[in-house]
Amino acid sequence: MLLQIFHLAQAALAAYGGQQSYIAITNLRKYEETTKKLAQVSDTAEYRRNNTYTTQAAGVAALVLSFFVSLTLALRGGVYGFLTRYIYQGVTAAAVFFARGYMHNFWADKTPGLKGAVPKMGDYDEAQRKTHELLNVLDMLMATWVATFFVALIIGY
């Protein structure tokens, strides 16, 4: 029962991360035409534009995987064999870890709300804030996957 509660909390956390990601992506898409034009004249702009979307996609993939695996284990964890349950947790923890690292490598130096920011870029600044919140959610999810793995080892399913 304890692990079911933990897994339901993980699903809720992943849903919250999904909300943050949705807001970030929606706000980033408002600048799509501008970034396309910049990408045509600058290799750096094209690189940054591509990485903006691929890092967001990696975060979404980790959230979706985490959400469905946590719900599956909460609702039907006892149906699966011992090894399968632990493999699900380990694979999900690894996916969240790598997605978070990939996102962090790109977004870490982009601090939202800096003084002297470009005017009329408030939605982009909000997208950065939501992306940093998503990074925090991925940190928490990674920690919960490791914790539930060890709790499951100690008390079993």
Image: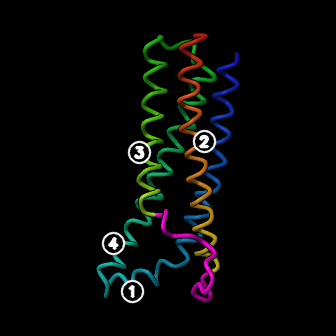
Q: Earlier in the sequence, mark 2 or mark 3?
A: 3
Secondary structure of the residue carrying numbered label 1: helix
User: Could you give the CA–CA distance between mark 2 and mark 3, rounded to whole angstroms?
Assistant: 14 Å
Tag 2 residue: 140
- Dot 4 or dot 1: first in sequence order is 1
Predominant secondary structure, magenta span: loop
Residue at the image position 46 percent from the left and 82 percent from the top: 33
User: Which residue is identified by label 3?
Assistant: 98
Residue at 60 percent of width and 42 percent of height: 140
The residue singled out by tag 4 in the image is 47
Question: How many C-alpha atoms fall within 10 Å of the one at disc 4: few (<14), some, or many (≥20)?
Answer: few
Q: Residue at x 43, y 40 (%)?
A: 95
Which segment did they paint magenta? 107-121
**Is 88 within the magenta?**
no
Question: Badge 2 local density, few (<14 within 10 Å), some, or many (20+)?
Answer: some
Query: Which amino acid does the dot numbered 3 rest on?
Result: Phe
Where is 36 relative to 71, above or below? below
Q: Residue at x 58, y 57 (%)?
A: 21
Mark 4–mark 1 CB contact (< 8 Å): no
State which tag comes first along the sequence, 1 or 2.
Answer: 1
Label 4 or label 2, whichever comes before in sequence order:
4
Amino acid, disc 2: Met
